[in-house]
Amino acid sequence: MSVEQRNHARYKVAWRSKVAVPGKGMVRGAIKSVSFGGGFLELPFSLPARTVLLMEVYPFVNGQRHTVRMRTQVVYTSLLADNRGYGIGLKVLEVAKMDEKILKMAVQEIAAM
């Protein structure tokens, strides 16, 4: 039985992303859920745990799309249903204060729905 390590509530989203993957360059992905401490990314390939990624995610705040840049770390990878790619659990390592503010506003907006 696994132990829940998440410290914040998770919210379903459908945000596009770009990820700088070591050895593969910039890759498009999809963020499917977020919290204040991490997220769930879908990619067509798996990544090893502890891989550090530079990312851009594109959340919406008040109906406008924003760009948030951050450094994340892979916590786990799992095969998605129907073998349509991989789900990557991420922990946020670093995000600029202004980007963090935008991300928090986007999550708060979703949480209020």
Image: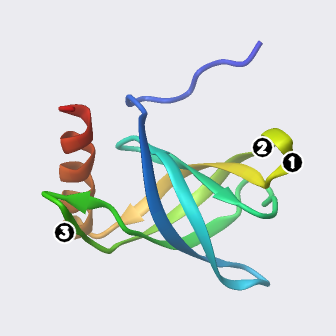
Q: Residue at x 79, y 84 (%)?
A: 23
Q: Mark 1 and 2 residues: CB-CB less than 8 Å, in contact?
A: yes
The residues tagged by marks 1 and 2 sit, at their Cα atoms, a distance apart of: 6 Å
Please tell me the numbered disc located at residue 80. Answer: 2
Residue 104 spot, x, y in % from top left: 23, 50
Query: In the current view of this chain or complex, which residue is farthest to the top?
Result: 1
Q: Which residue is mark 3?
A: 98
Q: Which structural element holds mark 3?
A: helix
65 in relation to 46, above or below: below
Q: Which residue is mark 1?
A: 83
Please tell me the numbered disc located at residue 29. Answer: none
For the C terminus, which image quadrant?
Answer: top left
Picture quadrant where residue 10 is located: top left
Amino acid bearing label 3? Met
Mark closer to the chain start, 1 or 3: 1
Amino acid bearing label 2? Leu
Picture quadrant where residue 69 is located: bottom left
81 in relation to 84, above or below: above
Q: Mark 1 and 3 residues: CB-CB less than 8 Å, in contact?
A: no
Q: Residue at x 84, y 42 (%)?
A: 82
Left/right placement of residue 62 relative to residue 5 reads: left
Residue 34 spot, x, y in % from top left: 43, 44
